[in-house]
Image: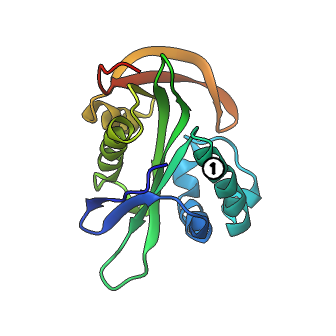
Amino acid sequence: MITTSVRLAHDTLMRPAEPADAGGLARAYQRSRDHLRGTEPDRDEAFYTPAGQSERLRSQLAERDAGRLMPWVLVGEPDGGEPEIAGAVTLSQITYGPLCSASVGYWISADHLRRGLASAAVTAVCAAADAELGLHRLEAGTLLDNLASQRVLTKCGFTPYGTAENYLHINGAWRDHRLFQKILNDRRP
């Protein structure tokens, strides 16, 4: 488990998710519902509530404790304002042995876009995956038309390696995805 936090910008901290983040995540998802609709799976109404996020966090933290997932939240700390969730990044499908790989996923809330947070968060996660988890490779997928996310991955050193047809069920249909990977190191597993 990774316990360190990383300052992404003067007013934004990336830290491991914790159960107390449920309310903040619910509010961030509510603020970003329209923005995320085109890139996320269909969500039921409970997903957007503190109770729904609490249940989701319990599952993620159990996966973290089993060594299969690492969730972080991005916390905006505006001058004079209440801290709020500005996004999240997750390493999932953490696998060791000869693969030593994981999948990275991320989102930024609609009111924190175009500030470089996604690139800073993915860069920080790559560093943690290498130094703290000892992984060799990370992968990510984007919808074919999600050019903003593709720019983030390219900026962070990921390279495209193929297209997966009907890869994920997003916004009501099976969608093709462009696949990216980043080799972190050449150490033995």
Where residue 40 appears, x then y in whole percent?
59, 42
The residue under the point 46% across, 24% down is: 100
* Residue 26 x/y as whole percent: 61, 65
Up-down relation of residue 143 to residue 189 (above or below):
below
Q: Which of the image's four quarters has the C terminus?
A: top left
| Residue 109 in sight from this viewpoint | no
Q: Residue furthest front?
A: 188
Residue beneath label 1, please? 60
Badge 1 density bin: few <14, some 14–19, many ≥20, Cα 10 Å: many
Q: Position of residue 104 (x, y in %)?
A: 46, 36
14 with respect to 31 (left or right): left
Residue at 59% of width from left, 70% of height from top?
A: 20
Q: Is residue 134 above or below residue 37?
A: above
Q: At which x and y percent is residue 145?
A: 45, 30
User: What is the secondary structure assignment of the residue under circle 1?
Assistant: helix
Left or right placement of residue 158 versus residue 171 in this view: left
